[in-house]
Image (cartoon, helix red, strand yellow):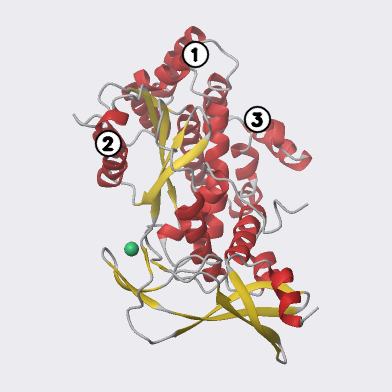
């Protein structure tokens, strides 16, 4: 068997013949030639026999490694004039437009990016994390289910922070499928408007319920005339619990600051009480549980705040029926209001203002556990996307992991 034939079988690149193979010190270079005569536009279906000029464009792509060897594919491409896209270099069937990698290599990167962490991918594939971001963007725009915005009825709109404090992404998820179906940079009314622009009037009119946090930005967009004024507004219960937890943390900080002023030694001991208070009591370590018992004996403002947070969590644990939730929520609102703890007095006002939305979520049975689970996963993914060059790449990583997408490995379909 000739070496070019052997490499043609090894590489399995569609639509090409291998014309040369050269081994260099650190890589194998495989030269290929397109089998088809016609020139195809990389952006549309247009193809032609006519070359735009006689200039060849030297192109190269990285393909899957061959053992320890890096493998580089090279080809000379022609240029065409597309009536819609102007003068372009012809597309190749084995790589995505403007990519320096073959489709097989990119599919492997995307599959790994959905499964494993940054440093593993960087070392295993010998590529930079920013490059992973660009690849994920291309794979997602290629493979994402084009029907993902059809048949949406119950959706959740959520903000998550990306990078330091002031970068945010808005994500829309389909409550029925538990998948993220849309995302963009920003967290204001305008960001949400752009979702409805893409969804269009007809599909927006089919929405029956939209869940969100207690901010006003998304609410303002959802209730606009051409958006989804007919949908029931729901407040995801996990946002309520998060707010109660935040109020507890504020009380804890106040208590700690007062204590520090009086007795710095006692305050130091108290500093690691934070997790004992914040975590679900079922998940405490032995040491944290002991700290919690100490806080209970101590009593005072902090223990009262803890009790309020815990009753809030119990209300939304998913075990109660809507009438019980309503009764207990009203009781919590009045207890918090009378608590003389400023953060909880404020919380009680917020809960009263959002009472209808909170109860609507319970009545409609929007699956809070699933929504919260998705929210937690998305937060971790956004953290992994910190090193990416753009918000679009960060959204793409979220879609890759939590969106309606089917990822293929290069050897899928073989054997
Ligand atoms: Zn074109």
Residue 330 in the figure: left or right of residue 116: left
- Which numbered disc covers residue 200? 2
* In the foreground, 358 or 188: 188
* In the foreground, 46 or 114: 46
Residue 370 in the figure: left or right of residue 330: right
Please give the residue where the numbered disc 3 appears in the rendered image: 296
Q: Earlier in the sequence, mark 2 or mark 3?
A: 2
In which quarter of the view is residue 229 placed? top left
Please give the residue where the numbered disc 1 appears in the rendered image: 325
Q: Nearer the viewer, mark 2 or mark 3?
A: 2
Residue 122: horizontal and vertical position, in percent? 65, 70
Q: Earlier in the sequence, mark 2 or mark 1?
A: 2
Residue 26: horizontal and vertical position, in percent? 71, 88
Q: Nearer the viewer, mark 1 or mark 3?
A: 1
**Mark 2 in CB contact with mark 3 (< 8 angstroms):** no
In which quarter of the view is residue 196 placed? top left
Residue at 76 percent across and 75 percent down: it is 6
- Is disc 2's CB within 8 Å of ligand 1? no
- State ligand 1's quadrant: bottom left
- Is disc 3's CB within 8 Å of ligand 1? no
Compared with 288, 68 (above or below) is below
Compared with 112, 405 (above or below) is above
Q: Estimate how packed mark 1 is, as few (under 14), some (14 to 19) or many (20 or more) residues with alpha carbons within 10 Å.
A: many
Residue that protrudes farthest toward the bottom in the picture: 25
Residue 273: horizontal and vertical position, in percent? 63, 44
Q: Nearer the viewer, mark 2 or mark 1?
A: 2
- Is disc 1's CB within 8 Å of ligand 1? no
Q: Earlier in the sequence, mark 1 or mark 3?
A: 3
Q: Mark 1 falls on what kind of element?
A: helix
């Amino acid at each position: 068997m000739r070496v070019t034939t052997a490499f043609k079988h090894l590489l399995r690149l569609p639509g090409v013949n291998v014309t040369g193979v050269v081994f260099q010190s650190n890589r194998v270079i495989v030269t290929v030639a397109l089998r088809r005569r016609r020139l195809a536009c990389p952006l549309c279906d247009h193809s032609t026999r006519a070359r735009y000029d006689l200039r060849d464009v030297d192109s190269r792509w990285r393909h899957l490694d061959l053992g320890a060897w890096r493998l580089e594919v090279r080809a000379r491409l022609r240029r065409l004039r597309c009536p819609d896209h102007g003068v372009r270099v012809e597309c190749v069937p084995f790589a995505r437009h403007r990519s320096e990698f073959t489709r097989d290599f990119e599919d492997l990167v995307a599959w790994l990016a959905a499964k494993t962490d940054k440093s593993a991918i960087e070392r295993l594939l010998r590529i930079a994390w920013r490059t992973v971001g660009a690849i994920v963007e291309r794979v997602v725009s290629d493979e994402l289910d084009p029907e993902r915005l059809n048949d949406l009825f119950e959706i959740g709109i959520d903000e998550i922070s990306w990078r330091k404090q002031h970068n945010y992404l808005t994500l829309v998820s389909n409550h029925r499928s538990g998948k993220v179906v849309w995302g963009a940079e920003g967290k204001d009314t305008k960001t949400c408007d752009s979702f409805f622009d893409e969804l269009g009037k007809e599909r927006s009119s089919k929405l029956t319920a939209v869940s969100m946090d207690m901010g006003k930005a998304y609410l303002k967009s959802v209730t606009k005339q051409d958006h989804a004024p007919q949908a029931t507004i729901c407040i995801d219960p996990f946002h309520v619990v998060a707010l109660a937890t935040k109020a507890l943390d504020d009380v804890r900080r106040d208590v700690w600051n007062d204590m520090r002023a009086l007795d710095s030694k006692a305050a130091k001991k108290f500093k690691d009480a934070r997790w004992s208070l914040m975590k679900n009591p079922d998940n405490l370590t032995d040491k944290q549980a002991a700290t919690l018992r100490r806080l209970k004996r101590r009593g005072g403002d902090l223990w009262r705040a803890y009790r309020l947070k815990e009753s809030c969590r119990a209300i939304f644990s998913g075990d109660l029926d809507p009438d019980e939730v309503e009764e207990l929520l009203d009781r919590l609102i009045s207890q918090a209001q009378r608590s003389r703890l400023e953060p909880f007095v404020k919380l009680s006002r917020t809960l009263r203002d959002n009472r209808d939305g909170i109860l609507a979520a319970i009545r409609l049975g929007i699956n809070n556990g699933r929504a919260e689970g998705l929210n937690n996963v998305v937060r971790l993914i956004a953290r992994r996307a910190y090193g990416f060059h753009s918000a679009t790449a960060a959204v793409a990583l979220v879609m890759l992991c939590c969106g309606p997408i089917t990822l293929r490995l290069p050897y899928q379909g073989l054997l």
